[in-house]
Amino acid sequence: MSWAALMPVEDALEQLLAMANEQCLADSEILALDDACGRVLASDLVATLDLPPWPNSAMDGYALNLADLHRQPLAVSQRVYAGLAPDALLPGSCARIFTGAPVPPGANCVEMQENVEVLEDGRVRFLQPLKIGQNIRAQGQENRAGDILLRVGKRLGPFELAVAAGQGLAQLHVVRRPRVALLSTGDELVEPGLPLRPGSIYNSNRVLLAHWLRELGCEVIDAGILPDRPAQTRLKLEQLQVSADLILTTGGVSAGDADCLGQVLRDNGKALLWKLAIKPGKPLTVGHIGAVPVIGLPGNPTAALVTFGLLARPYLLRIQGVEDVMPLSFTVKAGFAWTKSASRREYLRARLETGVAVLYPNQSSGVLLGATWADGLVEITENSTHQVGDPLRFIPFNELF
Ligand code: AMP
Ligand code: MG
């Protein structure tokens, strides 16, 4: 791919995922359940229990055997609360039962309390037609012992942790964290909390990416700010190469910075420079220093955000063994007209107002505030124009975390 041609986003993604497939992390660790959120399963999670472990009542009511119905009203022979182990049902009787309580052996139906008449002597008359199994959650209706509940490569969130907890698991086997060295490049950058020099700006990319990386299960090696000097860049990359699985940088990829990062990668490693058909985010540098991959995102905060979300994020999930790395997206109606077609695919910060995408007024790639206002990114494909009401693809921000 020559520097002059624009590379479609899909092609860049395909190349990054091919790299990631070569770089999949082989090591794993055992973590306490509470520490495993955001991590990826390193082996299948196999059920050790039937769930529910015994038939239990879905209602507050009365458990009975339908064969006894012709003998009603039925006396109440026991009371079964959740957490108790009931006796077998006395023939010709019913059992008072509460939601979640085990159904007594011998009972084959639960009637909800609203549908019975309790006589003065305490016996119970059933007023509605009844069916076998009614209001009983059968043993193993969710899963059987031995079932594979979650597959290797599954990213763990609160739902998955709860499923593991339901099996009594206090620990999980997960892929180790990718170690990502995060480097902000630019002579102009100053960390928040320090005085601003004339001509300098604060570093907003570091905190944005550090937190995002942690959400994706990564350990962040904060490599600070690097000036736009090839010698220092070379030294830094060589240092970081020892401890990192990936070096992620921002800035220094446009011509004005003398393409510092690309220069070092070309001289000391391997460099793939992509001019992507994407806006914001045109320049992306991908390469290796030694065996360690380097992804160089553009410096503009919104460009860094878009290219990280659409390209670096899938890479980081894939090296952890996640198969389905693409964010969920859906079609929304344009709440705006788009009259100027462009050769780059645009990702606009947009808010959904009753399903209609409304744009943040300032779509400049340097303006980060739009991301805090927006719900996600609306996609304008290459060389297209749109009328109000046209269907457009929308990627919610919460899908990118
Ligand atoms: P560059 O890709 O280095 O040419 O940077 C493009 C634009 O993004 C310039 O205006 C930079 O000042 C700005 N920029 C680069 N890095 C950062 C950063 N870490 N935080 C905020 N702005 C940045
Ligand atoms: Mg720069």
Image (cartoon, rainbow, N blue to C red):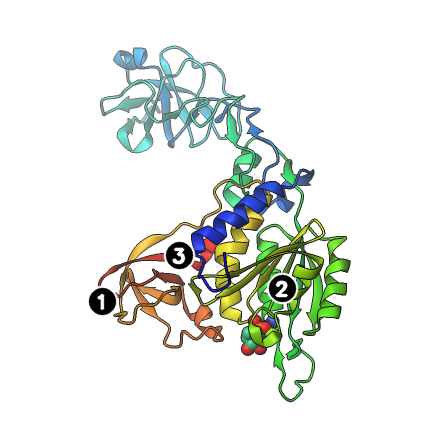
**Rendered image quadrant of residue 168:** top right
Circle 3 residue: 395
Of callouts 1 and 3, the N-terminal one: 1
Amino acid on which the number 2 mark rests in the picture: Gly
Q: Quadrant of residue 333?
A: bottom left
Asked whether mark 3 lies closer than 8 Å to ligand 1, one says: no
Residue at 47% x, 61% y: name it: 276
Pointer 2: what residue?
262
Tell me which residue sits at (36%, 65%) in the image.
343
- Where disc 1 sits, the SS reads loop
> Which residue corresponds to the image point at 65% horizontal and 65% vertical from the top-left?
263
User: What kind of residue is marked 3?
Assistant: Ile
Dot 2: element: helix
Dot 3 crowding, Cα within 10 Å, few <14, some 14–19, many 20+: many
The quarter of the rendering in which ligand 1 is drawn is bottom right
Of residue 55 and residue 154, the one placed in the foreground of this image is 154
Q: Secondary structure at mark 3?
A: strand
Residue 266 position, x and y percent, is: 65, 60
Q: CA distance from mark 1 to mark 3?
A: 19 Å
Q: Is residue 157 at all visible to an observer of this figure? A: no
Q: Earlier in the sequence, mark 1 or mark 2?
A: 2
The foreground one among 28 and 10 is: 10
Of tags 3 and 2, the one toward the viewer is: 2
Q: Residue at x 54, y 44 (%)?
A: 18
- Residue at mark 1: 388
Q: CA distance from mark 3 to mark 2?
A: 30 Å
**Amino acid at pointer 1:** Val
* Mark 2 burial class by Cα count in 10 Å: few <14, some 14-19, many 20+: many
